[in-house]
Image: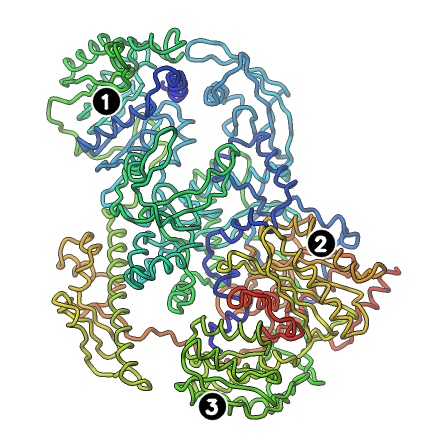
Amino acid sequence: MTGRARARSRGRGRGQEPAAPGAPVMPTPPEGQLVGRGRQKPAPGQQVVILISISAGFQQVKIGERGGRRRDFHDSGVHTRQLMEHVKESKTGVSGTAIELRANFMRLLSRPLWALYQYHVDYKPPMESRRLRSALLFQHEETLGKAHTFDGAILFLPNKLHNTETVLCSETRNGEKVEITVTLTNELPPSSPVCLQFYNILFRRILRILNMQQIGRHYYNPDDPFNIPQHRLTIWPGFVTTILQYESSIMLCTDVSHKVLRSETVLDFMYSLRQQCGDQRFPEACTKELVGLIILTKYNNKTYRIDDIAWDHTPNNTFKKGDTEISFKNYFKTQYGLDITDGNQVLLVSHVKRLGPSGRPPPGPAMLVPEFCYLTGLTDKMRADFNIMKDLASHTRLSPEQRETRINRLISNINRNADVQNELTTWGLSFENRLLSMNGRVLPSERIIQGGRAYEYNPWTADWTKEMRGLPLISCMSLDNWLMFYTRRNADVAQSLLQTLNKVSGPMGIRMQRAIMIEYEDRQESLLRALQQNVARETQMVVVILPTNRKDKYDCVKKYLCVDCPTPSQCVVSRTISKPQALMTVATKIALQMNCKMGGELWSVEIPLRQLMIVGIDCYHDTAAGKRSIGALVASLNQGMSRWFSKCVLQNRGQEIIDALKGSLQAALKAYLKYNNCLPSRIIVFRDGVGDGMLQSVVDYEVPQIMQSIKTMGQDYEPKLSVVVVKKRISSRFFARIDGKIANPPPGTVIDTEVTRPEWYDFFIVSQAVRFGCVAPTHYNVVFDSSGLKPDHMQRLTYKLCHMYYNWQGIVRVPAPCQYAHKLAFLVGQSIHKEPNMNLDDFLYYL
Amino acid sequence: MCLMRTHSRADLTKTLAMTTPFSPPLYMQRYQFVIDYVKTYRPKKVIDFGCAECCLLKKLKFHRNGIQLLVGVDINSVVLLKRMHTLAPLISDYLQPSDGPLTIELYQGSVTEREPCTRGFDLVTCVELIEHLELVEVASFSEVVFGYMSPGAVIVSTPNAEFNPLLPGLRGFRNYDHKFEWTRAEFQTWAHKVCRDYGYSVHFTGVGEAVGHWREVGFCTQIAVFQRNFHDTMSNAERLEPSVYRLMYRVVYPSLSDNNIYQRTLVNEVLYEAQHLRQEWLSRMNMDSSNNAHFCAPPLMDVFQHGLEGGTRDCQPVYQQGGTICVPLARVWSSPRVRALCGSVQRLREELQVDSRVRMSADGTVLILPAAADDEDDEEVEEEENVKAVSGVANNVEEDWDRELGCYGNV
């Protein structure tokens, strides 16, 4: 397998990049666009609360915030831990050996008894203008102090005034006397939600003082870019920051982020595209390439998602501005002094979901002029380009040491910059000038059980490719009737693959007959015809050697063999098997994969809980198939977690993903019953694919739905249920010191103190080993748990499950069922676009 | 000073909208007047007194027309602090740096104070400012602006009192902070005196005209444009640090006049062009080779020339030499973007020869790029790493969490 293929198979697909270590962070749309498309919306109650707290006095500080999106990205306000009796006291585990870590967190320090004082300000006679109000009030700076935040009615001060009610007298410039009454209404403790919001706004102000540019939710440094000229890419280094109440203190969490910008306008892009594909195919290609991309306008810093192209509009079209009609051309000339050079360019359409000013409904679709729009981020085509990604990685993939240095540099900038310090001290706040030191635990490494034998793996590489060599697998499916398709050009490699497969399958315990070799012409139709003519009911496996890694033929194979004619299949790109020296390794992997796809089992780990069913859920947001989302559910069928039931559903418009998955869960329970003659007494659901700010809806909506679905199996059936939300895209990072060097924490590191959230039953596990860059920990949040399972067991079980992904002879980032669900949803979303045939449900056919 | 400008402006346009609506709104017309002036006379250094929320500065930043230094002064530092970040460069300013330099500075200070660093400007704008001054202050204003600063030109706008009867519901001045509102005659008397005293000439105009026979009351806002009559001696003076005013904000826009930025932009553009030519050549080669022989690797000749079919302009072909692709500089030079950045091929060559990111032939006529994209995946290196015991190895004791849990539950 190529490195790329491996990366993909481990879940870093083309369309969906779950932030590989150090990978550039794409603009935020995948999350943003979910709102309003009938997916998981944040619970309405939550939003309202936030809006109120904002309008109740944060209008002014809100100025720093852009756009109308006021989603609670940090899921604060979801209090799940208090409902779980067994973790109220403690949610920490005990297993493993302690390890000293540093985390990318900094404590926010405030002087003792610090509070934010909220005052109501009243004018007599009443004053209309907000500016006048503020000017009159701040004639009394000596009384009120330098630090203040005032929105015209509510005043926030870091210091308490002498009296609860202070009467001040001001004079307007024409001698009118105004009496101002300042009344204390609230004393906000440092951890109050308003204060937290305030810190975040203050910190953004600080980043701006440090000359950082805000793009989306993050800040980037424009003065130190690096370029990939071949594609006109410009990459800005920057930071993701959040200030929140963590387990024991308020801290700033900051991680390095990179922004990919392009010094190429959409018009430039259109020109070169037209040149490449000709006038005929241009509209189609253009739509395909552009729709979904995020652009940045030249005349302000706003970003838009391209939703459509208005082929009948040019800059000469007019729009209504106030009461007058004005053409786009004239508008840009008079407003921004920008000349449109190409009067025939078509316009772009973006359906703005942002609210209008002061909460008014969205102003309708925005028409954008391609010439004034810069492309941002990477296209799928670029992401598939190995060279671009390599160039990018060389700059964005930071070693633990580099990453720590970058974060430390930000800390020292904050502490050195006089203006920043000034801003902070007037508010009586400061940041601790070093990263948080804390303790984690390294869980004992697991024993891998395979064919009656057990072995250990190197805990640092977390990989047992070598250890499993020569050992028989748990169960093998013999290959008696199978086909291999190849093109004439690849006849030789097909033969050598066949021979090598034969050679490697013996020691594993796989009996293999000679495959029926079928040559096909290098065209999609002839490949399909070859499949239709040769794949029969008793065919056990179809191997297709593809001449290139072009997606269409792969899609065609998968579509036919997953939907129309359910048969396990294995595609191999000829280049992967063209190198003789690597063929043994590749063939081994292919043999293992084929065995899994037919229902064989590879290895297992000790699972000390009986009658347990583990469920993994993930979703894929499809851009091609009319924006339907895809949900996948994978459930274990046996004690060893080596057999899985998989189901994939396409979400209908206006439907929550879980509604569609309810039936799948029932089907999984029925399958479990069939295999075990009993229903599971414990069900643990690992729910992946929950975006920022969607936790509330998982708790309020999905958990009850899951319970309901279980209930349908019988009124007296009451298994113990746990629901764990799995998150890969997080900004927490941990550094260990190993042999005097800053390094990644070893696989199995669990962090369940300090940087967790007090209101949650949550923990982090570093389960993978990465050879380059920084390892990304995975965050687990147990949002519902009636199992009574000790936190230590929950953590260890989770870690054990990370060992069970059969497409990787090592530990993966998430529990295997999540990785399987991801793989399945990805296959369906990228290639099949239909629900796979149910005959395949009991197999890992999508590996 | 002109603290209440927005306020008055908003009120004014609101009331006018009912009877004599100005479209676009009057304040916009005032800004447009300044923008048009800048477009015609192309001043390099512009200072706006009473800039308040920096609206005019923000407009001028877009309608730059060669402005290199843009300064705003206001007596109220709170407004400046609040709004100053709106003058920061946009992301696009970094992505495509402009040709000319631009610096924006904001100061807290008063027009009645002499500040050395305000001297040597080409244009001073005082939009709806003087009516907020006491009449005595107007005198020192005139002395400071015309006598001390003596810029190339001054634009002063102020309400025309004769227009006031047309504003419905208006009693007294248009804004309570106005100390006076002049008729045309009063304004002109002041202006002519200024011209006499400090060597300027003036012409009068305005924005916002009434319709019909009301026309004769003149513009709603009267504007005087002053031009200095004598040659300036200070415009090239060194920029000084402010001694009276307080610097609130300063930002230097990225521009091609910054050598680092210029170099970076040029090299990016050249490499983009060169890489494309290389790519084009490679794909043509691939096509040829796959047409000729299916199973052969592309022909490896020491020098394989390809081209000539592209017409006369392609007379300098891209070619392969060993493991490199050579792209003639002339081909890159034909890109309009590169041309726009670099005046001549000689300059281009000189710029590229000093840059470490570009490999060139010794004579500087050819750019050298690698032939094969090294897209070979890193070979699986089977490295024997020292096994470091980081944790206790798995305990071999059989565990049973169910049983444990049972006990735990009973306790």
- Compared with A70, A263 (above or below) is below
Amino acid, disc 2: Val
Q: Chain of mark 3?
A: A
Amino acid, disc 1: Ile
Specify the quadrant that holds the N terminus of chain B: top left
* x 46%, y 62%: residue: A398
- Furthest-right residue in this view: B410
Eye-nearest disc, 2 or 1: 2
Please state the horizontal and vertical placement of residue A715, each as a whole percent of the image: 84, 58
Q: Earlier in the sequence, mark 2 or mark 3?
A: 3
Q: Are marks 1 and 3 on the same chain?
A: no
Tag 1–tag 3 contact (CB < 8 Å): no
Q: Chain of mark 1?
A: B
Please state the horizontal and vertical placement of residue A16, each as a whole percent of the image: 51, 61
Residue A305 visible somewhere in the drawing: yes
Gap in angstroms between the C-alphas marked 2 and 1:
68 Å
* x 57%, y 39%: residue: A197
Residue A746 visible somewhere in the drawing: no
Tag 2–tag 1 contact (CB < 8 Å): no
**Label 1: few (<14), some or many (≥20) within 10 Å?**
many
Amino acid, disc 3: Ser
Residue that badge 1 annotates: B155
Residue that badge 2 annotates: A703
* x 32%, y 56%: residue: A269
Gap in angstroms between the C-alphas marked 1 and 3:
85 Å
Q: Are marks 2 and 3 on the same chain?
A: yes
Label 1: state its secondary structure.
strand
Q: How many marks?
A: 3
Mark seen at residue A496: 3
Gap in angstroms between the C-alphas marked 2 and 3:
51 Å
Please state the horizontal and vertical placement of residue B381, each as a whole percent of the image: 47, 80
